[in-house]
Image: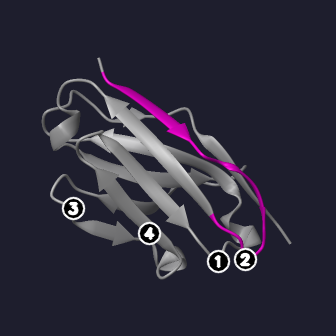
Amino acid sequence: QVQVVESGGGLVQTGGSLRLSCAASGNGVGSSSMGWYRQTPGKQRELVATITSGGTMDYADSVVDRFTISRDARKNTMYLQMDSLKPEDTAVYYCRVWGQWLARNYWGQGTQVTVSS
């Protein structure tokens, strides 16, 4: 059974930094893709950044040059380093794990990021 657990959210001022972590466990996780998504009330969940098992990364235009996604294969843990945070980055951030060896998408419980102006 796959488990996905996020951590690292919090409250930060504009221009500050936070690092999110997503620890995944279970069969097939090591060869999966992982990604960060975020959602605010009344809006659809949107992609922030993704990283494949081979290390290929992709970013939403709104976070390019501010956020950095990375992955520790030995720990099956993904990170999101968020710098130069803006109030519009305020959202619940979710980790997603998916891949051909997994039965379905797996989501974490979400972690709140709040950026004060």
Hey, what amino acid is under mark 2?
A: Gly
Q: Earlier in the sequence, mark 2 or mark 1?
A: 2
Mark 2 nearby-residue class (10 Å; few <14, some 14–19, many ≥20): some
Question: Distance of mark 2 from mark 1, alpha carbons?
Answer: 4 Å
Hey, what amino acid is under mark 1?
A: Ser
Residue receiving disc 4: 68
Q: Earlier in the sequence, mark 4 or mark 2?
A: 2
Question: Distance of mark 4 from mark 2, alpha carbons?
Answer: 15 Å
> Horizontal placement of 85 versus 21: left or right?
right
Residue 105 place in picture, x, y as percent? 32, 35
Q: Earlier in the sequence, mark 4 or mark 3?
A: 3
Q: Earlier in the sequence, mark 2 or mark 3?
A: 2
The residue at 40%/71% (across/down) is 59
Q: Earlier in the sequence, mark 3 or mark 1?
A: 3
Residue 29 place in picture, x, y as percent? 23, 35
Q: Quadrant of residue 95?
A: top left
Residue receiving disc 3: 55
